Image: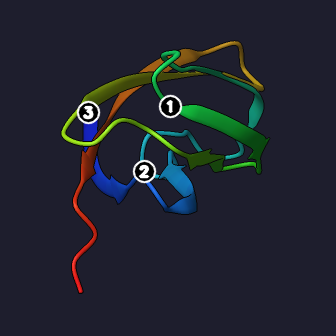
Amino acid sequence: MSYTFRKTVEGDLDYELDYSEWLGVGEAIISSEWTIPATIIGGVESFTDTTTTIKLSGGTLHQRNRLLNTIVTSVANMDARTVIIDIVVKEL
């Protein structure tokens, strides 16, 4: 599964993925790892039983950044999702 977001170079924002529809009854996320390119700045990473979050800042204008979020669940299932971050011009 893949998600695409747009952000500005100036933006310092949280990006969240919701796995609740994929998780089984009583299943929870027990670990989350983000792989990010050197062209964007990754900050605080966190997760709950059903979501994962990363704070991103910076980036190079007009560049597409491909991130990967890999989770492991309480019943040893693993999933990985691609996140595309397009760096765009700040609209006034």
Q: Secondary structure at mark 3?
A: strand
Residue at point 53%, 16% (across, down): 38
**Who is closer to the viewer here, 16 or 14?**
14
| Label 3 crowd (10 A; few <14 / some 14-19 / many >=20) | few
Say above or below: 26 vs 78.
Answer: below
Could you tell whether 89 is left or right of 16 in the image?
A: left
Disc 1 + disc 2, Cβ < 8 Å: no
Query: Which label is found at residue 12?
Result: none
Say above or below: 20 vs 40.
Answer: below
Q: Secondary structure at mark 2?
A: loop
Which quadrant: the N terminus? Answer: top left
What type is the residue that disc 2 sits on?
Glu
Which residue, given by chain and number where applicable, does mark 1 sit on? Answer: 40
Q: CA distance from mark 3 to mark 1?
A: 18 Å
- Mark before the other along the chain sequence, 3 or 1: 3
The quadrant in which residue 34 appears is: top right
Residue 45 image offset from top left, x and y in percent: 75, 40
Could you tell whether 78 is left or right of 22 in the image?
A: right
Q: Secondary structure at mark 1?
A: loop
Residue 63 image offset from top left, x and y in percent: 23, 32
Residue at point 43%, 38% (across, down): 59
- Mark before the other along the chain sequence, 3 or 2: 3
What type is the residue that disc 3 sits on?
Ser
Could you tell whether 68 is left or right of 30 in the image?
A: left
The quadrant in which residue 33 appears is: top right
Which residue, given by chain and number where applicable, does mark 2 sit on? Answer: 21
Label 1 vs label 2, nearer the camera:
1
Residue 57 image offset from top left, x and y in percent: 57, 48
What type is the residue that disc 1 sits on?
Ile
Which residue, given by chain and number where applicable, does mark 3 sit on? Answer: 2
